Image: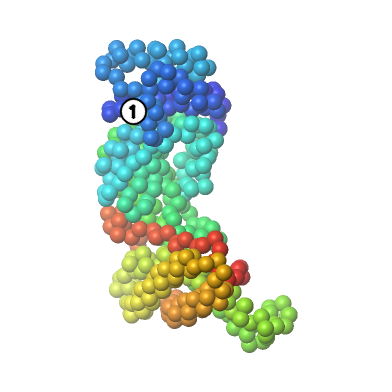
Amino acid sequence: MPSNPPVEITLVLSASAGIVAVAHGERYQWAQTALKLVGFQHRDDGTFALTVNDPQAARDAVHQLIRTARRHQATVTASHRRYLGDVADEIAAHLPGTWSAKAGVHSHPVWQHDLLPWLWDAGELIHAVQTERLPYTATLTDDTGIELLLTERPGHQHDYLLGAFAPNGFDEHVAETSPPSSIVLAAAPEQAAHAIATRFLPAYHHALHTRRRVTVAFALERIREEYDAWQAISESGRFSDGRPMDPDHIPDLEGQSADFTWQEFRDVLTHAPALLDQCRPATTAWPKDDAALNRLRDALAQGTGILADWNARLDDLRQTPAALPAETYGDAKAERDARMLPVIEAWMADREVFLRQARAAAPLHPLAAHDHAVRALPPVPAHTPGASSARR
């Protein structure tokens, strides 16, 4: 990241807020003090604003700020750009579907690095966040939970950069697929929205489709491997390294195997519904796959209900006294696993049909995507009564 003065104030104009000021730098608090002394009001998005009634009043306010900022060792820079929050609001208004925009200030230089773990980008945007100073950014969010990051393009007078945050509901152990690449946007909000709708969002949904498919395939493969390994152990009475299995440990080992399978199948419950919605067997070389896909849909509906019942049961268990016997949790978990087993078996039986149809399916068009949000995984309690750690 380039070296910057320790205290800076950047001024931009906003049609609704007047003069918007952003205090940033390692000692940004000094700049904030100067802004308050001049009469700028702190806003919820982290900026400061001063409403002015005429151009002369604006010039007087800026001159006063420059003098005050100098006493607080801060430099003042006036940007030729419009306030990014206004630009984001206008872009959101022109996008298909329902979008909202929110600006955010990264006053300290290191704060913008908080964005890096969440960015899902293979283009210029993530490089800019890593290497350039971005005092403020804006987030665009639609009603399905898609989140996009908008920034001014460093080193350019008018352009903007836009990329995506990673969607929810993906485990870190799944191999990463290629993320969408950020794009350069023109300054005109209508043109920017058109580029997002026709170029970026289709690429985003294509990448999301691939990531969902890989995630479900990975989960089903892990479940198959776990089943095969447990069958081999059960039949031989020995672990894979040749050690004999103690019969007294069988219940614990079965519980660990069931826990492992349950955790993996949650990825199927989360991501398979949207993939199934995109499958069109009649347009593929396997039109008769439709019957298998219907079985999988029915199984998913059952599994979703079982998961909802389990989460409700966990809520009930959390309300019980701390002295609750471990058997109570164990009995509930055993019932859960027994109910879910036919669902998992249905998916294992038709998994190859699903995977070939998912590979052949086309991702949703952005205009239809609002019906298929990425559902986050249900929360897992930090500690549940009688729980044993799953074998990984």
The residue labelled by disc 1 is: 82
Quadrant showing the C terminus:
bottom right
Q: Position of residue 60 (x, y in %)?
A: 35, 12
Quadrant placement of the N terminus: top right
Q: Residue shown at 42%/47% (left/top)?
A: 164
- The vertical placement of 389 against 335, above or below, is above
**Amino acid type at image mark 1:** Arg
* Corner quadrant of residue 155: top left
What kind of element bears circle 1? Answer: strand
* In this picture, residue 119 sits left or right of residue 370: right
Q: In this orientation, does residue 79 appear?
A: no
Farthest bottom residue in view: 235
Q: Please report the residue visible at 45 percent of the width from the left and 59 percent of the height from the top.
A: 169
Kindly identify the residue that appears in the image at 39 percent across and 48 percent down.
147
227 and 182: which is toward the camera = 227
Q: Position of residue 212 (x, y in %)?
A: 43, 62
Q: How many marks?
A: 1
Please state the horizontal and vertical placement of residue 115, each as a whole percent of the image. 49, 43
Note whether 233 is above or below 167 in the view shown: below
- Mark 1, residues whose alpha carbon is within 10 Å: few (<14), some, or many (≥20)? some
* Position of 196 relative to 391 (above/below): above
Task: Using the rendered view, name the quadrant where residue 324 is placed.
Answer: bottom right
Residue 126 visible here: yes
